[in-house]
């Protein structure tokens, strides 16, 4: 297989603005089909992929023998159902985060993936960006010595968008599921460590049964590290994104919108070291969505290990589950 033919289950704005163009731009990938019952929504995709087929149902797209892989950008509560259906239909599947609502559901997905021999993964795109890979390598190489503290924040304000699925409990909304996956998962990726679940504590603000602000603290351990952790996520604060890895010999900041690289400017990794020396490494014109599609396609074509397997995803979801268990009102 030289080219992976992709189909999209649903015509969400994110799919239209980010993932569909990424599939169209990626080497070895072709945007071949879209499932939507709304011709007006299909038009936005056909503007750059005029030869793309349009199916009027998800089931019809999954039955299309020309489709090798599907991308699922549906609301959170639908992810497990349609990931399983895609695998049963013989399709490789990349599903938006969070791929599930609870960690045990991922065990079901792992079993289905293994039984099918197909690739199924969560679209945790940041692990494919050289900015994050560089931060991971710096920590592993001892650039900041022993890791003592990791801090993170991811915030935006969508209070005026009442109908947004992130503001609706029935669609699995809330900031923890939407962006906690990044502040939690990036700490795991960069350090190779895991949260000590019994150490986690959280304060949260809920509106309409979805979390709009949350502060999580605790400890991580593993891969030669043991450190304190603190992170804030919010859907009611001004935009901010940053992760800081603080050691006894230096400090690493992954900044300039690292979870939406390119949105706020050029992706950067800042390294502060002895003598008040700051080194800034920049990563211009890198699209992590394109890199994600290319990595997925490489795994499909060659069987190479994928950079974000479901086993990694389960670790982050386990932390999310625990945060909900222990969260107390602010």
Image (cartoon, rainbow, N blue to C red):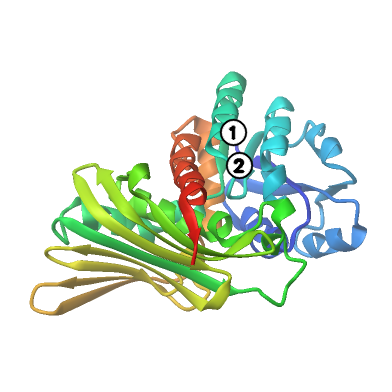
**Place of residue 62 in the rendered image (x, y in percent of width and height, measured from the top left):** 78, 35
- As drawn, the residue found furthest toward the front would be 329
Note whether 223 is above or below 264 in the view shown.
Answer: above
**Place of residue 219 in the rendered image (x, y in percent of width and height, measured from the top left):** 29, 51
Mark linked to residue 105: 1
Residues marked 2 and 1 touching at CB (< 8 Å): yes
> Is 9 situated left or right of 123 in this image?
right
Q: What residue would you read off at disc 2?
A: 100
Task: Check the picture and name the quadrant holding the N terminus.
Answer: top right
Q: Secondary structure at mark 1?
A: helix
Note whether 108 is above or below 261 in the view shown.
Answer: above
- As drawn, the residue found furthest toward the left would be 275
For mark 2, does the 10 Å Cα neighbourhood hold few (<14), some (14 to 19), or many (20 or more) residues? many
**Place of residue 16 in the rendered image (x, y in percent of width and height, measured from the top left):** 72, 61
- As drawn, the residue found furthest toward the top would be 115
Q: CA distance from mark 2 to mark 1?
A: 6 Å
Quadrant of residue 68 within the rendered picture: top right
For mark 1, does the 10 Å Cα neighbourhood hold few (<14), some (14 to 19), or many (20 or more) residues? some
């Amino acid at each position: 297989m030289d080219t992976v033919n992709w189909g999209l289950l649903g015509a969400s704005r994110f799919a239209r603005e980010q993932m569909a163009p990424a599939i169209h731009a990626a080497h070895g990938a072709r945007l071949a089909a879209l499932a939507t019952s709304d011709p007006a929504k299909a038009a936005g995709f056909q503007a750059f992929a005029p030869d793309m087929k349009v199916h009027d149902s998800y089931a019809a797209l999954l039955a299309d023998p020309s489709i090798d892989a599907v991308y699922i950008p549906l609301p959170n509560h639908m992810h497990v159902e349609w990931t399983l259906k895609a695998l049963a239909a013989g399709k490789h599947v990349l599903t938006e985060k969070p791929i599930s609502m609870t960690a045990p559901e991922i065990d079901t997905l792992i079993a289905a993936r293994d039984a099918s021999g197909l690739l199924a993964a969560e679209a945790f795109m940041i692990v494919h960006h050289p900015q994050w890979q560089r931060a991971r390598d710096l920590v592993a190489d001892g650039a900041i010595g022993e890791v003592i503290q990791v801090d993170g924040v991811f915030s935006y304000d969508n209070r005026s968008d009442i109908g947004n699925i992130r503001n609706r409990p029935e669609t699995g909304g809330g900031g923890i599921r939407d962006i906690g996956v990044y502040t939690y998962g990036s700490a795991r990726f960069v350090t190779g460590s895991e949260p000590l679940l019994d150490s986690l504590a959280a304060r949260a603000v809920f509106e309409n049964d979805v979390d709009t602000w949350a502060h999580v603290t605790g400890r991580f351990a593993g891969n030669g590290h043991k450190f304190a952790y603190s992170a804030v996520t919010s859907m009611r604060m001004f935009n901010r994104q940053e992760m800081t890895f603080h050691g006894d010999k230096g400090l690493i900041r992954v900044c300039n919108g690292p979870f939406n690289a390119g949105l706020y400017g050029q992706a950067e990794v800042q390294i502060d070291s002895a003598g008040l020396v700051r080194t800034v490494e920049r990563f211009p014109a890198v699209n992590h969505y394109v890199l994600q599609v290319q990595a997925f396609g490489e795994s499909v074509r060659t069987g190479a290990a994928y950079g974000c397997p479901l086993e990694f995803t389960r670790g982050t979801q386990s932390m999310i589950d625990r945060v909900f268990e222990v969260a107390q009102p602010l």
